[in-house]
């Protein structure tokens, strides 16, 4: 399975609202497999299709992988149907290399979507899985983690990203969760 190239901000695909998937066919199955491979190779906790240049509503998440287990979740057209509580977690994004910020999210979410067998799936999540699902669903709406911060912080990060792109800097490898 080929590992895909992960797009980096300011690529415009990352800011677009992704389209619903209407047919779960072989193309979608292959895309999901390539995305999982890309996520594990990064390594990341989650990946959304726009991050590999496909503006469609498909995400992969594995919040157990960092603990040496494997629990791959693939969701098509995912939606947050319930959210409660508040939690602040450190987040990095595979599309924002070198950026690591505290982001406020719902503590628990109920997410609905379809799996690759066209079965409806409902996932009750908390902890890292809840954060990863919210981060990836944001990607489907063109929302990046800096949109969840103050305007000042957002502008600092956007400036830093433009500098990284211009100078082709390698991001520092730090130990935090990438989505
Ligand atoms: Ni991300």
Image (tube, rainbow, N blue to C red):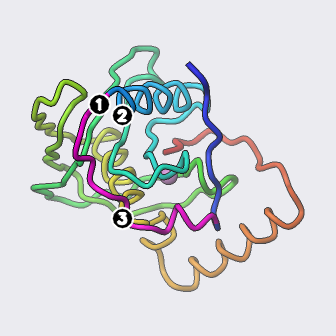
Q: What is the x, y in percent for residue 55?
A: 43, 55
Query: Crowding at label 3, few (<14), some or many (≥20) Cα neighbours within 10 Å?
Result: some
Side of 56 relative to 83 (left or right):
right
Side of 163 relative to 120 (left or right):
right
Q: Quadrant of residue 103?
A: bottom left
Residue to which mark 2 is pinned: 28
**Disc 3 from disc 2: Cα separation:** 19 Å
Instruction: Answer whether residue 20 is magenta in the image.
Output: yes
Magenta stretch bounds: 11-25
Side of 80 relative to 128 (left or right):
left
Q: What is the x, y in percent for residue 36?
A: 46, 28
**Disc 3 from disc 1: Cα separation:** 23 Å
Question: Are the residues tagged 2 and 1 within 8 Å (C-beta)?
Answer: yes
* Residue located at (59% from left, 47% from top): 94
Q: Quadrant of residue 118?
A: top left
- Work out whether mark 3 precedes mark 2 in sequence or the reverse, and give the earlier one: 2
Query: Crowding at label 2, few (<14), some or many (≥20) Cα neighbours within 10 Å?
Result: some
Q: Quadrant of residue 140?
A: bottom left
Mark whose residue sits in front, 3 or 1: 1
The yes-or-no answer for disc 2 within 8 Å of ligand 1 is no
Residue 25's label in the rendered image is: 1
**Disc 2 from disc 1: Cα separation:** 5 Å
Instruction: Answer whether residue 12 is magenta in the image.
Output: yes
């Amino acid at each position: 399975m080929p590992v895909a190239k992960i797009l980096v901000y300011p690529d415009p695909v990352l800011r677009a609202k992704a389209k619903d998937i209407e047919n779960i066919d072989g193309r979608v199955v292959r895309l999901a497999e390539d995305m999982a491979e890309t996520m594990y190779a990064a390594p990341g906790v989650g990946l959304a299709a726009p991050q590999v240049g496909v503006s469609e509503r498909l995400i992969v998440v594995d919040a157990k992988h960092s603990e040496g287990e494997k629990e791959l979740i693939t969701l098509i057209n995912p939606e947050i149907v319930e959210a409660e509580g508040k939690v602040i977690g450190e987040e990095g994004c595979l599309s924002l290399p070198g950026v690591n910020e505290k982001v406020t999210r719902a503590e628990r979410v109920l997410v609905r979507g379809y799996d690759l067998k066209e079965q409806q799936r409902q996932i009750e999540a908390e902890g890292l899985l809840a954060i990863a699902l919210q981060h990836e669903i944001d990607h489907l709406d063109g929302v990046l983690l800096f949109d969840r911060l103050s305007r000042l912080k957002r502008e600092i990060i956007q400036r830093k990203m433009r500098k990284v792109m211009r100078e082709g800097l390698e991001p520092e490898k730090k130990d935090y969760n990438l989505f």
